[in-house]
Amino acid sequence: PTGAATQVDVGPEGRLRFDPEDIEIGVGDTVAWTARSPGHNVTTRPGASPKCQSPEGAEPFSSYEDDNHFAIMDVGAVFTHQFTVAGEYVYVCAPHADQGMVGTVTVVE
């Protein structure tokens, strides 16, 4: 159902991961990432990590402004993004991308 955001925990219990790591949503749906421990962010901006990817025609998104890739979320802060382009998005926590803090959102028509 549209309207309800899909919830993703960022760094739950201090672990370097997103939970769930892989989600599937429909075009027009929203994902809400909630910071559960300090030191994390959410981004698909190519400059943040070579792992980041977005479908053609989709604007990159991030929980921070501009190219400040190490700007972190306050614990308890929520970042939301509405997905309007179908395809696969690979996002990371920029400070921890090399430690495998990577997630995917698959958006289906």
Image (spheres, helix red, strand yellow):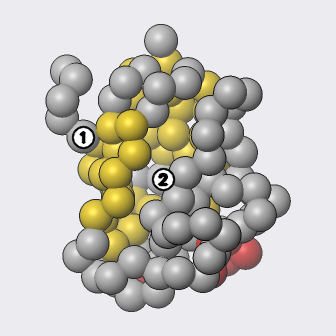
Where is residue 40? Give x, y as percent: 47, 78
Residue at left 49%, top 44%?
22
Pick the quarter of the image with the N terminus.
top left
Query: Is there any visible trace of residue 91 in the rendered image?
Result: no
The Cα atoms of the two marked residues, 1 and 2, are separated by 16 Å
- Label 2: which secondary element: loop
Residue most toward the top?
Answer: 109
Instruction: In the rendered view, tell whether residue 50 sits above or below residue 29.
Output: below
Residue at left 44%, top 39%?
23
Q: Residues within 10 Å of mark 2 (few under 14, many from 20)?
A: some
Residue at left 39%, top 77%?
73
Question: Left or right of 31: which side holds 100?
Answer: right
The numbered mark at residue 21 is 2
Query: Is there any visible trace of residue 72 in the rendered image?
Result: yes
Residue most toward the right?
Answer: 50
Where is residue 53? Give x, y as percent: 71, 45
Instruction: In the rendered view, tell whether residue 55 sits above or below residue 97.
Output: above
- Depth-wise, is mark 1 or mark 2 nearer the camera? 1
Is residue 21 or residue 32 the one in the foreground?
32
The amino acid marked with disc number 1 is: Ala
> Mark 1 sits on what residue?
5
Question: Left or right of 43: which side holds 45?
Answer: right
- Label 1: which secondary element: loop
Question: Left or right of 102: which side holds 83?
Answer: left
Q: Dividing the picture into quarters, in which one does residue 79 lie?
A: bottom left
Instruction: In the rendered view, tell whether residue 64 sits above or below residue 24.
Output: below
Where is residue 71? Give x, y as percent: 53, 81
N-terminal of the pair, mark 1 or mark 2, is 1
Is residue 1 or residue 28 the one in the foreground?
28
The amino acid marked with disc number 2 is: Glu
Instruction: In the rendered view, tell whether residue 89 sits above or below residue 50.
Output: above
